[in-house]
Amino acid sequence: MNLYRKLFLLAGLTLLLISHAASAQRAVATVRIQTNIQKCEACKQILLNYLKREPGIISANVNTYNKIVTVRYYTERTNPLYIEYAIANAGFDADTVKANPDSYQLLPPCCKDTTSQQKPPANK
């Protein structure tokens, strides 16, 4: 009988520790990244839809007026550099990462930066 009581207490303690570990808070951070996004709703939606699919990103907000993307993310799943690469893969420049040229070419004309170095060469 005493053995069963000890096993029951041990099992209860184990469940308590497991449930406490599972309910621990995840570390969340916010990063602001400067981009070359244009003042266009289409550009904003393209970037938001791309970031929504990235692992670890909780939310994203695009300010097209200031050309800043604010991203909330789980620190154990992603980091600011990875988020910059995600923005670049969507076709936009990020702080230290240039846009992926192939993705940039797929953007609608209104989303292409007219001052960017990535303009296609003029035909002569």
Image (cartoon, helix red, strand yellow):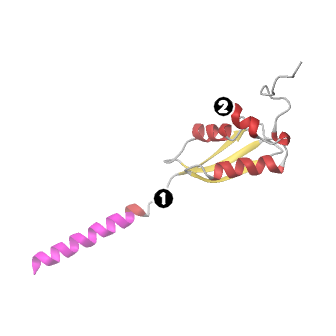
The stretch of residues the image draws in magenta is 1-20
Marking on residue 15: none
* Residue found at x 81% / y 41%: 111
Q: Is residue 79 above or below residue 116?
A: below
Is residue 42 found inside the magenta-colored segment of the image?
no
Q: Return the mark for residue 25.
A: 1
Q: Residue at x 72, y 34 (%)?
A: 93
Q: State the residue position of label 2.
A: 97
- Characterize the magenta stretch by its predominant secondary structure: helix
The residue closer to the viewer here, 41 or 103, is: 103
Amino acid on which the number 2 mark rests in the picture: Val
- 93 relative position to 82: left or right: right
SS under mark 1: loop
Magenta stretch encompasses residue 9: yes
Foreground: disc 2 or disc 1: 2
Quadrant of the snapshot with the C terminus: top right
Q: Which amino acid, by three-letter code, is at mark 1?
A: Gln
Can I make out residue 99 in this image? no
Q: Residue at x 69, y 47 (%)?
A: 70
Residue 47 horizontal/vertical position (percent): 72, 47
Q: How many numbered marks, from 0 up?
A: 2
Q: Return the x and y of residue 37 as percentages of the image width and height.
A: 78, 40
